């Protein structure tokens, strides 16, 4: 039997589409920046990324890189539901982002 490859799909979507996914799968209202599904789909709201890039004085590319890394970390088992887990995840994100420079 052949080797099964893991696939990651990154989809750039609008706030409107993200809000629908957020409500349908997480039972939360409004858009969010990134939603990751266990089968390797990472949905990123470009609208939110643009707003956050301006607010944090990042480029849009850098903001989207952050969201992709965030999604990949979720796929590797990281969680950000508690402040402790979120801090751990943020440290991992920053380490990866620094390596991309």
Image: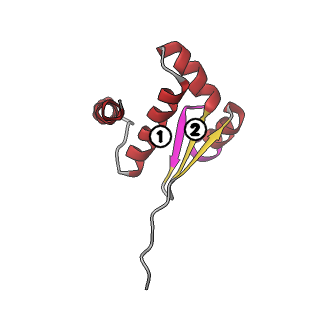
Q: Which mark is residue 44?
A: 2
Residue at 44 percent of width and 33 percent of height = 66
| Disc 2 from disc 1: Cα separation | 8 Å
Residue located beneath label 1 in the image: 68
Residue at 69 percent of width and 40 percent of height = 20
Judged from this view, the residue extending furthest toward the bottom is: 1
Q: Is residue 30 magenta?
A: yes
Q: How many marks?
A: 2
When the figure is inspected, residue 51 is found, relative to residue 7, above or below; the finding is above
Point out the tag, 2 or 1, that comes first from the N-terminus.
2
Whether residue 53 can be seen here: yes
Return the residue nearer the eye: 79 or 27. Answer: 79
- SS type, badge 2: strand
- Please say which color scheme the image uses: secondary structure
Judged from this view, the residue extending furthest toward the right is: 16
Mark 2 closeness class: few <14, some 14–19, many ≥20 residues within 10 Å: many
Judged from this view, the residue extending furthest toward the front is: 101
- SS type, badge 1: helix
Return the residue nearer the eye: 68 or 18. Answer: 68
Q: Which residues are magenta?
A: 24-36
Q: Is residue 50 magenta?
A: no
Residue at 35 percent of width and 29 percent of height = 101
Is the C-beta separation of discs 2 and 1 under 8 Å? yes
Mark 1 closeness class: few <14, some 14–19, many ≥20 residues within 10 Å: many
Query: Is residue 37 left or right of 75 when viewed as pictured?
Result: right
Residue at 36 percent of width and 51 percent of height = 76
Query: Is residue 55 left or right of 46 when viewed as pictured?
Result: left
């Amino acid at each position: 039997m052949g080797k099964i490859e893991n696939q990651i799909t990154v989809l750039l979507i609008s706030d409107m589409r993200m809000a629908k996914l957020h409500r349908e799968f997480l039972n939360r209202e409004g858009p969010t920046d990134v939603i990751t599904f266990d089968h390797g789909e990472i949905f990123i709201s470009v609208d939110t990324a643009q707003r956050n890039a301006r607010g944090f004085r990042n480029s849009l590319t850098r903001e989207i890189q952050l969201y992709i890394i965030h999604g990949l970390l979720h796929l590797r088992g990281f969680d950000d539901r508690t402040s402790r887990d979120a801090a751990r995840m943020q440290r991992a994100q920053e380490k990866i982002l620094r390596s991309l420079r």
